Amino acid sequence: MSAYRTIHPKARRRPHSFTAPRKSIVLTLVMVVFLVYALVPLAWLFINASKTQGDLFSGFGLAFGDSFALWDNIVQTFTYRDGIFLRWLGNTLLYVVVGAGGATLLATLAGYGLAKYGFPGRKAYFAVVLGAIAVPGTALAVPTFLLFSNLGLTNTPWAIIIPSLISPFGLYLIWVYTLESVPNELLEAARIDGASEIRTFFTISLKLLTPGIVTVALFAIVATWNNYFLPLIMLRDPDWYPLTVGLNQWSSQASGVAAEPIFNLVLTGSLITIVPIIAIFILLQRFWQSGLGAGSVKG
């Protein structure tokens, strides 16, 4: 054994030694700052949603009130004005499922087709998509309102759903992801085996595109869920309000001649509003992890 170590110096090294990850104090402090920046607003919202209307202005914002009234506030939120909050929640879910779901579907089909098929005007179409990404949504709100007003679609759910179906950024993201994750050789092999384009897309391409599709879906869901300005100018009937506009209407009750402040219900409603988004992120996180794992062992 000693002769072997003399002839082979590398044999002295342990075969299963691992290098400990380097630690950066500066990076750790930066991450702590970001963590505090992200969690403090959530903590403030939860604490104040557990207070009564009187306790909101009688103590420190990050301290609990004299009584823990979270459950009472939740019950009042869902029962106030004949349960209009539940109607707003249903409207928001409708806009998200149809609008964001449709936007994800259209972006996936268009982005995949743009990346894998050649057709006349392809470059011009791609230039239009890139230009549309640079245009802010608020700049298109008034022209969209005038168009839908001429069509007689204002104050209807279609005034919110149809604009939500268009996602230039989602299309661009799917286009980029398709180029990187779907090899042309794999598609050619499927075509040689006699598979149709539709079958190839659903059996091969769709599985490879899952992380990109989930990313586009999350962007579309968050954008539709938090959409405020478009429903504000499109809708007049409170029965069609989403949560964003409805909660703002409750907040506005604190001013005026017949003021009726219900800030405790506004905060509780806001807390309820973010719960589905957090749940969606947690449920869809595994698709990102599986996609990254598949990519790490590819080829």
Image (cartoon, helix red, strand yellow):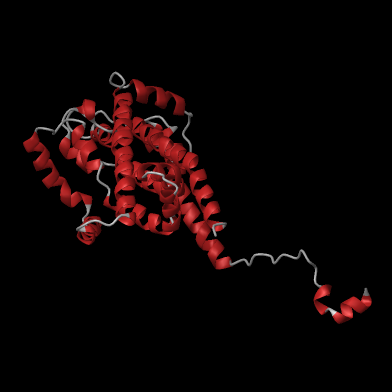
Percent of width and height locating residue 23: 62, 66
Depth order, front residue of 162/191: 191
Depth order, front residue of 183/220: 183
Percent of width and height locating residue 153: 13, 33
The answer to whether residue 62 is visible is: no
Quadrant in which the C terminus appears: bottom right
Percent of width and height locating residue 188: 42, 54
Residue 223 sits in which quadrant?
A: top left
Residue at the outermost top position: 82
Q: Is residue 148 above or below residue 116?
A: above
Residue at the outermost left position: 150
Residue 116 sits in which quadrant?
A: bottom left
Q: Residue at x 72, y 64 (%)?
A: 18
Q: Residue at x 32, y 36 (%)?
A: 96
Depth order, front residue of 200/66: 200
Quadrant in which the N terminus appears: bottom right
Q: How many marks?
A: 0
Residue at the outermost right position: 2
Q: Is residue 185 above or below residue 90?
A: below
Q: Residue at x 37, y 37 (%)?
A: 57
Image-based side of 170 in relation to 233, left or right: right
Q: Residue at x 44, y 56 (%)?
A: 181
Percent of width and height locating residue 145: 12, 41
Image-based side of 68 in relation to 173, left or right: right
Image-based side of 139 in relation to 44, left or right: left
The answer to whether residue 193 is visible is: yes
Q: Is residue 121 above or below residue 82?
A: below
Depth order, front residue of 176/282: 176
